[in-house]
Image (cartoon, grey):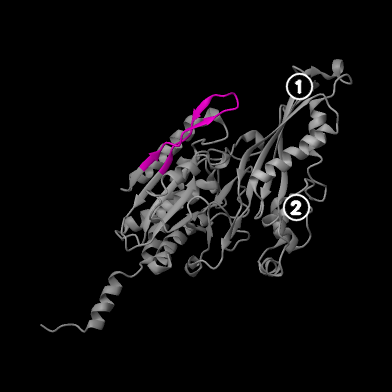
Amino acid sequence: MKLLPLSCVMLALSVVHAFRYEDLVEHVNRQQEHYVEVLREWVAVESDSSDVTKRAELHRMMDMTADKLRAMGCNVSLVDVGHQELPDGQMLALPKVVTAQFVSDPQKPTVCFYGHVDVQPGKMEDGWATEPYNLTEINGNLYGRGASDNKAPVLAWIHAVEAYQALKLELPVNMKFLIEGMEETGSNGLDAMIVEQRDSFFSDVDYFVISDCGWLSLRPALTYGTRGNCYFSAEIEGPKQDLHSGVYGGTVIEPMSDLIGILDTLISPSGKILIPGIREAVAPLSDEEWKTYQDIEFDMEYYKKKLGLRELMYNNKVDLLSHMWRYPTVSIHGIEGAFSAPGTKTVIPAKVTAKFSIRQVPNMDPAVVKKQVTEYLQSAFASRKSPNQLKVTMIIGAKPWLADTQHVLYEAGKKAVKEDVTGKGIIMMPIGGFDDGMHSQNEKISRYNYVEGTKLFIAYLHEVAQIPKSGV
């Protein structure tokens, strides 16, 4: 028998184990209608984590996620993360966190995808053009609450693994999933769960992947940092019940007037934060950062048009992008207790509560910001000499984080950042668009991004597998 040269044997082996990207892409193309239908099923679940009356739907969404992964043959767990205490003292079970694992080969790197399947509120009366929980396709866009944030990206990662399985191809990495249901309200219970399982489920994880962000333009982008969030409520209470303005107006100091008065002290018309210590904590923009922003592809006119605005806060790209990404901002979100229904109602509300947030950037500490905001508002309120009562509460205190752009994952075409609880590298890999309307009316993801994003994740798993294990 004539033996083949060693070089031919090696070539044959390389062909057998070659990355069959085109075959995987063809499979994804064939499955895209199925992908849309699965997304339709997931969007139909009103998994609004901010509405405690929808908690049963949230539990159902977590079960659906676990069932989807379990049907793919992986090890799935639903992890109990405790209870949530409501303002009235009632204890409500938090949705379980889904963990799942495919493959366990010590010779391969381990990638853990983090995502969430809870959503923001969505109601037709808020201005939606289509039913928020009925996925509707218009001109290649898939409209529905949670479509972009974050159900389609979660499904795209699942579809990527399914594609390898359908073609009977071995996954190039050990793949884990971490899916929660409370991200939109502060990820209650998640940090404690990660710490508890750091030496078990997370012990062999080399990289985390997050796809809960979007592109700035029509081109794919790398996200190298996210702002944190300190979310506050400011409650002012006066009379024991609502009053008729025609009878009592002019005789009482109204809680709503007090509330509007102190909210007006938070920020200037030009966007300058007036709370002492907030702006001072932020490092000045460096020359290197300025050049980075200057070189980014970004069409301000297109951005303004998509937002439906006549004017932006800043009229040049660097100022706009730096205030979008690396400076803190104050946003006032709403007032609870105020009359907001159609028609007229001549009432003086007895108690009103404002909801506002301050986006955090590096060098800011949520605990310090909580103290600064509380003391500032108490001082502003005291200057009004009102007999009403003010209560300031920080509901969410999420830290910012920033990429280590020299991390080895950049060699795989992505970026990694450090995260406090896990201590692992995290890759931010978005597939949504900047105009997807996350948290807003008419949220959508384009069919193109959903399908092509699945292909991107397939390719990325291959690229991560090429990183030498010593580089992990």
Question: Gap between marks 1 and 2, in whole Å?
Answer: 34 Å
Circles 1, 2 touching at the beta carbon (< 8 Å): no
| Residue 226 pos. (x, y %) | 61, 54
Mark 2 residue crowding within 10 angstroms, few (<14) / some (14–19) / many (20+): some
Which quarter of the image is occupied by the N terminus?
bottom left
Q: Quadrant of residue 295?
A: bottom right
Q: Which residues are magenta?
A: 77-98
Q: Position of residue 111 (x, y in %)?
A: 41, 57
In reply to whether residue 404 is colored magenta, the answer given is no
Residue placed under numbered mark 1 in the picture: 350
Q: Quadrant of residue 316?
A: bottom right
User: From this viewpoint, which residue is outermost toward the left?
Assistant: 1
**Residue 140's x, y, as percent?**
55, 53
Residue 60 lies, with reference to residue 252, above or below; the image says below
The answer to which of 219 and 425 lies nearer the viewer is: 425
Query: 418 above or below 120?
Result: below
Of residues 178 and 367, the one nearer the viewer is: 367
Q: Is residue 194 left or right of residue 126?
A: left
Q: Is residue 466 visible?
A: no
Left or right placement of residue 368 versus residue 459 in this view: right
Q: Secondary structure at mark 2?
A: helix
Q: How many marks?
A: 2
